[in-house]
Image (cartoon, helix red, strand yellow):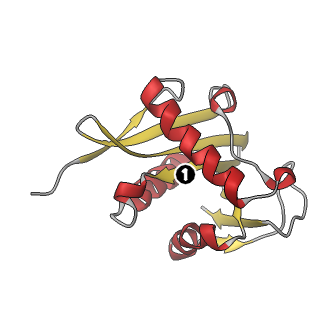
Amino acid sequence: MRRTVRILLDDPSDPEVAGFLEEHLADVERTSPPDSRHALDIAGLLRPDITFWTARAGAELLGCGALKELDHRHGEIKSMRSSQRHARTGVATRLLRHLIDTARERGYHRLSLETGSAEFFRPARALYLKHGFEHCAPFGDYAQDPNSVYMTLVL
């Protein structure tokens, strides 16, 4: 029997979610040099220009994602992550579609992201390419970095 996955606005400081995000930050720390780490901590995710969601089946936390407003026409995907237990089960796709739909509803003309260039991030890059994102130059406050890949989707 297939469980219903719900995407919900959530609080990154909730203890369960915070633990999940700490795993994300630990992965980034393991796979990216200090000057190339762009993942947001809990305080960063609580900023007013960021909206944060979790994917859940019942009470089980499956993944998370956030949308940062860069300006009224441009959004950035932040903190996309699926639990290891639910990797490659469609959770990331559901979250990504939700973020894209929300960006369109907000009237953004473009949705961008930064992810790592290391092998660890290959599945994420493949997911974004599959959904129409293309490689682009650094945007916002980012600078060219061989440890980063920048992608964008025109909406």
| Quadrant location of the C terminus in the rendered image | bottom right
Where does residue 38 sit, x and y in percent of width and height? 75, 48
Left or right: 143, with 91 as reference point: right
Image location (x, y in percent) of residue 152: 68, 65
82 lies left or right of 13:
left
In the image, residue 109 lies at what x, y percent? 66, 55
Given the current orientation, which residue lies at the most extreme right position? 143
Give the residue type at disc 1: Met
Residue 60 visible from this viewpoint: yes
Q: Nearer the viewer, residue 9 or 115?
A: 115
Quadrant in which residue 6 is drawn = top left
Q: Secondary structure at mark 1?
A: strand
Give the residue at mark 1. Answer: 80
Q: Is residue 15 above or below residue 140?
A: above
Does residue 63 lie above or below 15 as drawn? below
The image position of residue 120, as x and y in percent, is 61, 68
- Asked if one can make out residue 113 in the rendered structure from this viewpoint, the answer is no
* Residue 124 image-quadrant placement: bottom right
